[in-house]
Amino acid sequence: MTDRMTISVPDEIGGYLRRTGNASAAVSDLVAKAMEQEATTDLLHRAGYRVTPEFVADGSQIAQNTPPVPPDDAAGGGTYGV
């Protein structure tokens, strides 16, 4: 299913979209990435992380401060984080 709409964008963004050859796909990809980032940020907030611009810029904080997922939980059979 698709939703057709008309949007106004600054000239430089319009130029970029015209150069892509498929403006709809370019916009859809960028919006999907923004939605994924929003979902990830929400997940991190719920897990107790304070997500700041510095935190996002240094993603290694997540790897350094996150305990490994036990094998049962990685397979979906445990209660990790409960």
Image: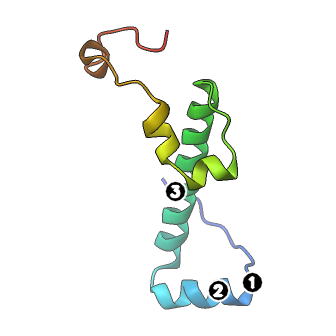
> 65 or 9: which is nearer to us?
65
Which residue is at 57% across, 59% downward? 31
Calculate the distance from the C-alpha at mark 1 to the C-alpha at mark 2: 6 Å
At label 2, counting other C-alpha atoms closer than 10 Å, the crowd grade (few under 14, some 14-19, many 20 or more) is: few
Q: Which amino acid type corresponds to the residue marked 3 in the rendered image?
A: Lys
Residue 21, labelled with which disc? none
| Secondary structure state at the residue bearing disc 1 | loop
At label 1, counting other C-alpha atoms closer than 10 Å, the crowd grade (few under 14, some 14-19, many 20 or more) is: few
Which residue is at 55% across, 69% downward? 27
Seen in the picture, residue 19 relative to 7 is either above or below; the reply is below
Which residue is at 64% across, 86% downward? 14
- Residue located beneath label 1 in the image: 10
Judged left or right of residue 36, residue 71 is: left
- Residue located beneath label 3 in the image: 33
Mark earlier in primary sequence (1, 3): 1
Calculate the distance from the C-alpha at mark 1 to the C-alpha at mark 3: 20 Å
Is the C-beta separation of discs 1 and 2 under 8 Å? yes
Give x and y (percent) for residue 76: 30, 17
Which residue is at 62% across, 25% downward? 46
| Secondary structure state at the residue bearing disc 2 | helix
Give x and y (percent) for residue 77: 29, 10
Q: Quadrant of residue 8?
A: bottom right
Mark earlier in primary sequence (2, 3): 2
Q: Which amino acid type corresponds to the residue marked 2 in the rendered image?
A: Gly
View extreme (front): residue: 64
Judged left or right of residue 56, residue 75 is: left
Residue 14, labelled with which disc? 2
Q: Which amino acid type corresponds to the residue marked 1 in the rendered image?
A: Pro
Is the C-beta separation of discs 1 and 3 under 8 Å? no
